[in-house]
Amino acid sequence: MSGLDAGPSTEVCVIGGGPAGSALALRLARLGHEVYLVERHAFPRPQVGEALTPGVWPQLEVLGVAEAVRSEGFLPAREALVRWEDTTARPVRARMGADGLLVDRGRFDALLLAAAASAGVRVLQPATARRPERTAGGWVVPLLHEGRETRLRARFLADAGGRSGCLGGRKVPVSAPTLALHGYWRGERRQGPETRVVAGPDGWSWGAHLPDGTFSAMAFVDPALLRERGVGRRSLEPLYRELMDGSGLLEAWTAPRLVGGVRARDATCYRDEVPIEEDCIKVGEASFSIDPLSSSGVQKALQTALSGAVAVHTLLVRPGNAAAALRFYREDQRDSVARHAAWAAGYYGEHRAHADRPFWKRRAARSPMPSPPEPPPLPQDALAHRRWRLASDAVLVDTPCIVGDVIELRGALSHPRLARPVAWLDGVELASLVESLREGLTLPQLAAAWARRVPWRQGVSILGWLYRQGLLTEVTPSGSR
Ligand SMILES: Cc1cc2nc3c(=O)[nH]c(=O)nc-3n(C[C@H](O)[C@H](O)[C@H](O)COP(=O)(O)OP(=O)(O)OC[C@H]3O[C@@H](n4cnc5c(N)ncnc54)[C@H](O)[C@@H]3O)c2cc1C
């Protein structure tokens, strides 16, 4: 390190100015931390991941950039034409009330980074971070900035460098190897604004019109297909054109023509084995990557940044809660990856036309886990006479939860029917309520016992939820059933 510029010192250094890095830096600056962000490229720079799911809107609100994104002239994503199970295309609308978005990622990412800078983040750009070194006094990050080698010292380091990351560490694959072949198209006339998703014998294709008037089109295949065809990185175009022609995706244009070259990108899903330690965190695709099938990579990246910011803030200001913060972030990553992998496998399993082809066999789950049976409808006289108590297999477990701006251990209700322990319901902490459920009480008695903690109506609605989840057991004179 000798001979290098001494460089600045900071509390937190974030490497990478994609959605995850900007969102993390912005939240930490708002929580009062001194933050530097290092981004390799001048913005706007091209990036894949142009279709954003409606779930990004609440995140953009939290970050305070929703209005700026609305005014940026991006395109609403209202409907997709999906040819998936068989050869019939069907229209699919976004499930949530709000539309998704089709963005220019160069401009979208620049907007988020500018918001971080306005929140007080010091942005070094273009600046490339080399492999950071952990020292007794914190991190030393060697940088190439404005043609000079320098270094940045930081107490805490965040890797938001995307797939390549900068901290290293083992990435465990959680899907079959997948390659995306990608190009942009223009034509004479647009044939409908819909996003298009089409399943084919050796993979699936996605295409959407973008704000700049181009049509982004990708084919997702096994890398083995390229090897079988003897296709190298420099000779991708004939195979890409063949896949596009076979998919019918380019019917989105009359007279489509490819503009620019064809690129191949790794789209394999993975999970980093160590997403957080006491002095560093990985957010966005540095932590894990999900199947592009859901078009929710950016939403997930923002989610890791928002929950990551609380974990980092806790580590910095409440070292006594460090174990809870580390557990919270690790469990969040593990759950997100598992849930998404199960969803993707189920969705691949819905494809029938080429289900016996290797691409589909490698990805599809044919027998989803059976869901537990629904409890019978609430008996008519349940409210008045019958007595209920908490099911014997429902327990309170210490669970790391976000409380305000930090992570704390709280008692949460755990039961085999619940996907994860539940600490709060409708803003009410369950631990204090379920104590009254140890003995058998009628529902009016319970609502009365809870009256000091929750309004009557809310109490009844929480009881209804507990019943529907199968967490209430009726107490009969001879015991419980
Ligand atoms: C083929 C494909 C299609 C996809 N389609 C979608 C989609 O439709 N919708 C969707 O939501 N998601 C999609 N995704 C996923 C989406 O692209 C990512 O989830 C998202 O970009 C992750 O954001 P990030 O901030 O973690 O990383 P990135 O967006 O990759 O940003 C990382 C940043 O770090 C910088 N950086 C890296 N290393 C260094 C360094 N050493 N020094 C300084 N800077 C550095 C890079 O320049 C970059 O700007 C797709 C992914 C693929 C592969």
Image (cartoon, helix red, strand yellow):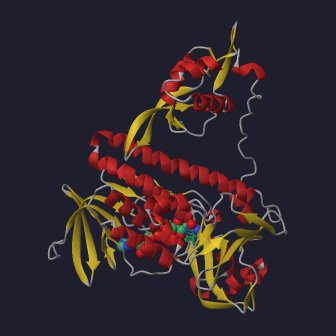
**Residue at the extreme top of the image, as rendered:** 478
Residue 253 shows up from this direction: yes
The quadrant of the rendering that contains the C terminus is: top right
User: Relative to residue 330, is residue 468 depicted above or below?
Assistant: above
Judge whether 364 appears above or below 426 on screen: below
Q: Quadrant of the N terminus?
A: bottom left
Q: Along the horizontal axis of the image, is 96 left or right of 357? A: left
Please give the name of the residue rendered at 55% of the width and 53% of the height, measured from the top-left corner. Answer: 337
Q: Is residue 375 left or right of residue 13?
A: right
Identify which residue is drawn at 71% across, 43% down: 369
Residue in the image at 63% along x and 32% along y: 461
**Residue 119 falls in which quadrant of the image?**
bottom left
Can see residue 17?
no
Query: With respect to residue 256, does 378 lie above or below?
Result: above
Q: In the image, residue 140 lies at what x, y percent? A: 23, 64
Identified at 65% across, 87% down, the residue is: 185
Q: Answer with left or right where residue 324 lies relative to residue 339.
A: left
* Residue 248 in picture, x, y percent from top left: 78, 79
Residue 447, x across and y down, in percent: 59, 22
Q: In the displayed structure, does residue 87 sit left or right of residue 421?
A: right
Q: Return the residue nearer the eye: 342 or 481.
A: 481
Which of the 4 image quarters holds residue 211? bottom right
- Determine whether 397 is above or below 234 in the image: above
Residue 236 location (% of width, % of height): 63, 84
The total number of labels drawn is 0
The image quarter containing residue 135 is bottom left
